[in-house]
Image: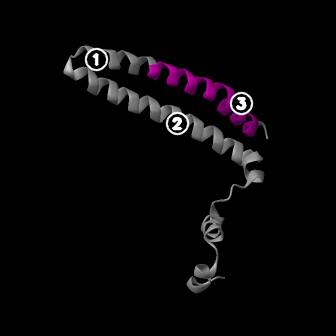
Amino acid sequence: MFNAWSRRDRPPEERAAAGLEGFAVDKTFLSSLKGILLETELDFLRCVSAIIIFLVVSFAAVTSRDGAAIAAFVFGIILVSVFAYDAFKIYRTEIVPRAAQGDQQ
């Protein structure tokens, strides 16, 4: 284990690499079943959180009754529908079949 004095004696590029040692991506975990499920769940949660954020911002924008605010509201509703469709497709193609496979085992 290095102490603070030995870190100062290293070149700057080695110090930066040593600081990021714990953030390495484990590719075997990401290719395993748990890693794939985690990736799918995060993608689904991204869609759901985008839906919530765009709905709140769209309704907040339309309260001013300005022309640009109404255009922002319509654009936000279109984005909400796109994210809702994406979440629906992720749920049907990736989450439901894996849950059915887990029930069979």
Badge 2 or badge 1: first in the primary sequence: 2
**Image depth: mark 3 or mark 2 in front:** 2
First to last magenta residue range: 79-103
Question: Amino acid type of disc 2?
Answer: Arg
Q: Is residue 50 magenta?
A: no
- Seen in the picture, residue 8 relative to 101 is either above or below; the reply is below
Q: Is residue 95 magenta?
A: yes
Q: What secondary structure is marked by label 3?
A: helix
Assign the N terminus to one quadrant of the image: bottom right
Question: In the image, residue 15 lies at what x, y percent?
Answer: 61, 71
On residue 46, the disc is 2
Question: In the image, residue 26 lies at what x, y percent?
Answer: 72, 55
Residue identified by numbered label 1: 68
**Of 76 and 45, which appears nearest the observer?**
76
Question: In the image, residue 7 lies at what x, y percent?
Answer: 60, 79
- Seen in the picture, residue 44 relative to 14 is either above or below; the reply is above
Q: CA distance from mark 1 to mark 3?
A: 43 Å
Q: Main secondary structure of the magenta part?
A: helix
Q: What secondary structure is marked by label 2?
A: helix
